[in-house]
Amino acid sequence: MRSRFSPSRGLEVGRSVRPARLRLLAAASLWLLVSTAAWSEPAPEAGRRDANCVRSQFRVVLDIGHTAEAPGAKSARGVSEYEFNAQLGRRLEKALLDAGFDKTVLLITAGPARRGLYSRVKRANKAPAHLLVSIHHDSVPEQFKQDWEYGGVQHRFSDQFKGHSIFVSNDNPDRKGSLLFGRLLGKQLKQRGLQYTPHYTEAFMGSRRRQLLDAEAGVYRFDQLIVLRATRMPAVLFEAGSIINRDEELKAGSGERQRLISDAAVEAIAAFCDARSPARRRSASVASAGRDTPIETVAPSANPQ
């Protein structure tokens, strides 16, 4: 078949080969459209694990420990625990909202200690929440404290212990969920170079001695805590650091430490949301065939600290 070449139109073919050329042009156009779309769409976030998590529907309650009237422990420089709790809580609330957890609730209450505690639990249970995180900062028993002067005022301190700790209750209605989130949070904190305190396992802690459930993540069992046992959703109490320790007090109040903790918490909550999504839970239910392992049977690994 004769063919002609025109500088303005390129190669012209005879009538019998034109359908093949059209098919080739159509295939090339389709490839161009697909490749253009692929480049124009944003790439999936690296390492994203919460594919099944609908963040906008996952409600997290952030419980600010204590009240302004009953502010909890005093730091080495005389600042109330409540102030540290509220500052970190607001930082974490913003981080969660920025990450798409639009239903996050920051729970702040007033009143005497016990009444404020029961009020927080009651308010948390009214919300259809998927997770509660109670934010606190730690101190030590009186026998470990010493006197020192700061700003012309006498204060008490103890530099003997430092680090965060995570507590869950075996009496929580969703004890497995509580332990799961505690582990996720502890591991995220560890990845950022933060260490938990191991002193709760020591005999000298007396009545404050706790069972260590996970020695990698720093999760302890504390059944008696009302905020953990009386809430209807998975719950953890997070002691973000020892503010009676003079060095750690300064770090706890810094933006850098609060950012590290907030980043770790957001990652842990995203992973927990993914793990607790309906699709994930159905798969886990089939795999476990109805088994329910109580917290006390979980064997901790060797303490790496």
Image: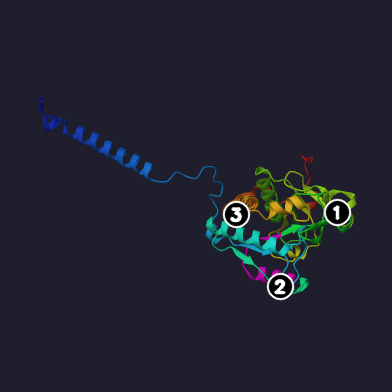
Tell me the quarter of the image containing the C terminus: top right
Inspect this view and state whether residue 164 appears: no
Q: Residues within 10 Å of mark 2 (few under 14, many from 20)?
A: some
Q: Residue at x 56, y 46 (%)?
A: 49
Badge 1 element: loop
Question: Whole-Å distance between the Cαs marked 1 and 2?
Answer: 27 Å
In the rendered image, which residue does mark 1 sit on?
209
Q: Which residues are magenta?
A: 116-135
Would residue 248 be seen by someone viewing this image from the given angle? yes
| Coordinates of residue 141 in the picture (x, y in percent) | 86, 57
* Label ID, residue 274: none
Q: Earlier in the sequence, mark 1 or mark 3?
A: 1
Task: Determine whether, in the image, residue 121 is placed left or right of residue 272.
Answer: right
Q: Residue at x 47, y 45 (%)?
A: 44
Foreground tag (2 vs 3) = 2
Percent across and percent down for residue 182 are: 70, 52
Q: Is residue 291 left or right of residue 48?
A: right
Q: Quadrant of the N terminus?
A: top left
Of tags 1 and 3, the one toward the viewer is 1
The residue that disc 2 covers is 119
Distance, label 1 to label 3, CA atoms, is: 31 Å
